[in-house]
Image (spheres, rainbow, N blue to C red):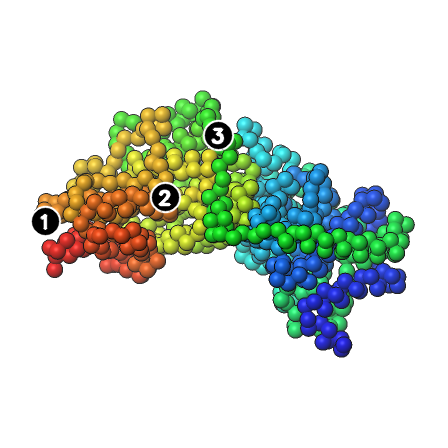
Amino acid sequence: MPRGARRQRLFDRATIIDKAFIDRVGAGHLPEPLSDTTLAGAGLEVHSLAGLFETQVMSRHLDLMARRSKGRTFYSIGSSGHEGMAALGLTSRLTDMAFLHYRDGAFLLQRKKSVSGSTYLYDMCLSFSASAEDPVSGGRHKVLGGHEIFVPPQTSTIASHLPKGVGAAHSIALSRKLADVEAVLPRDAVILCSFGDASVNHSTAQGAFNTAAWTAYQNLPMPIVFICEDNDIGISVRTPKGWIEATFSNRPGLTYMACDGRDILDACRGTAAAVDYARRTRRPVFLHMKTVRLMGHAGADIEAAYTDVSHIEAGEAQDPLLHTARHLIRAGVMSGEDICRLYQETGERVMRVAEDACARPRLTSAEAVMAPLVPPVSSGSGRKAPALPDERARQEVKELRQKDKPLPLARHINLALADVMLQYKNTVVFGEDVGRKGGVYSVTTGLQSAFGPARVIDTLLDEQSILGLAIGMAHNGFLPIPEIQFLAYVHNAADQIRGETSTLSFFSNGHYTNPMVVRIAGLAYQKGFGGHFHNDNSFAALRDIPGIIIACPSNGTDGARMLRECVRLAEEERRVVIFLEPIALYMTADLYDEGDGIWASRYRAPAEDHRVKLGEAGHHGDGRELCILSYGNGYYLSRKAAKVLGEKHGIRPRVVDLRWLHPLPREAVLKHARQCQNVLVVDEARRTGSVSEQIMALLAEGGIPAKTARYCAEDSFIPLGPAAHEVLPSVDGIIDAAMKLCGGGK
């Protein structure tokens, strides 16, 4: 078969790599050394070298099996050419948490080999075949991970896992300061975070590197090793020669090191040095590891379509397994014949294991697939008893409280946060300007003074890093309460919630969770400050994410009670919660008339109060002619409208405050709707993609006989100044919509 044609078929591509290894070793045609690193220089004994080779061979045969088992295995993106990562599996500790590149099968195998009784080959094959018995994802994805080896599972990430790696590293340093927090990781642990050379150009990666360096530049601890596995290509686009070294070798706050991952001895030397440096100095390291990509990008990728055959063959000649074979032969550990025998026997072993694994059952129902979207609650999860706060913090919080007068929403949230931080020593509040300033709207005022800068943290201005910090901290036993300054800003980092936070329980079958309460100041109706970045009324991007909870209080009493429930949901049920705070209602005290003070209320501490439970809606009035369903500013405006409807038109509505926007309080909505002749949904979000659409569908599917209508914001961004009112619901608009629905309008 002509040389070019032989590379057109996927099966042949795997066969070429497979056969080439046996042929080259058998003939003694091994590559020249890539470094002068010796066994002693690598810190290895001969038996360790043999063990690493076995790991590399197993990883290779798993790739070959996946390529040859089409229809029985899935997602055959492989690790061939990156087997040098087995070195990091040996030179790091089991408790050095690792966030992995999708080509790190060799690392995973090497680490799993250190766990007594581990069935690592079988487990990997179960994952490849999407079996429901896969101990990591339960058949939901081919992932590299394992709770017992401190590897949170990753899917096909580009660079979205880097910010949470930085967050986990920061949490290790924080656990040293907050000694009474039950941290998951040892206080001398190092975080490992690997990725490809093309991924360094992604904004998420750049943000993570910058955050780590920004932290280290201030002499703050950041024990993380970034491992760039440089195979010179991203799918089909070549990385410019020298780009990685030029970009990272002189970056302030980031120590650059390099090794050759094709040479297992040099890989051991480099990874050991990087991990040791990060552990000793508590500073970030960028380890530039040279690798080679074999067999193309993924299963359906035909590399010959965009790469010269000569370049492909040059890569094959630098196969890491060939380099390790040369070391074994020269060290007298194994002969060429021994190496070929081990290689072939391992291949047969992998195929036997794969046969068994591919026959195991797969997920067969939607319920089974979706089960871990809501993490299972174990008997040991959460903290059952309040922590004992130190007396200084207790006194400062006591001074924050002003029980003798009614307070608006912002002050209720502020005091509830203080009480939460007294109760749970693992809570940490952080975000832009939340510390000394107390936040743009003073919602976190006094918290840093009471609890110190280790628990109330001013972050750099980068939402990806803020949410990544939250994810990483949650991995280490903390309960993060990050603040996103404005709703519009969360879109800069939505993938940290959509692609990382929300998927973790799903892809780990509930073994891993990252509980948190993300506070977001948002929605519209701000006066004197605006434009669409500060008056954003759309949160559709959040509602679309499976498994998360979205809460939205409309008043101070609900704000405190709901925040306590959100913290409980995160701490005890391991949930990801979005706490959406209506900015325009932060300081609102009056409802009908200036000075009436109806919308303000006295704050009550947890011991004197209760929570608003998930799914529990609020309501005002018991009328049966009209039910108004709303939330946030819409509920506030509807209460105003209800007074006019009653006094001027004889219609006394019941006004329902949804409170919970995802999932909706289904039973409460249907209960109130069934008791009324007409149902009006008032939604301050845009008409398209809004909560109101879901409610209307719920009413229809629930067989509600009432007449229904909805009144929403226009499908528009929010303009500056008075023009904003042209595209948002108003009191008069609610009255008009209600009158039309009830038959009394125009």
Is 317 above or below relative to 583? below
Using the rendered view, name the quadrant where residue 60 is placed.
bottom right
| Residue sitting at x 84%, y 49% | 38
Query: Mark 2 and 3 residues: CB-CB less than 8 Å, in contact?
Result: no
Q: Earlier in the sequence, mark 2 or mark 1?
A: 2
Q: Earlier in the sequence, mark 1 or mark 3?
A: 3
In-front residue for pair 623/192: 623
Q: Amino acid at mark 1?
A: His
Which mark is on residue 551? 2
Mark 1: secondary structure: helix
Q: Amino acid at mark 2?
A: Ala
Mark 2: secondary structure: strand
Disc 3 crowd, CA 10 A, few/some/many (<14, 14-19, 20+): few
Which mark is on residue 649? 1
Would residue 291 be visible to someone looking at this image? Answer: no
In three-dimensional space, the C-alpha distance between marks 1 and 3, rounded to whole angstroms, equals: 52 Å
| Residue sitting at x 72%, y 64% | 14
Q: Earlier in the sequence, mark 2 or mark 3?
A: 3
Question: Residue 370, image x and y in percent?
Answer: 48, 49
Which residue is labeled 3 in the image? 383
Quadrant, the N terminus: bottom right
Is 495 above or below relative to 561? below
| Residue sitting at x 74%, y 48% | 87
Q: Amino acid at mark 3?
A: Arg
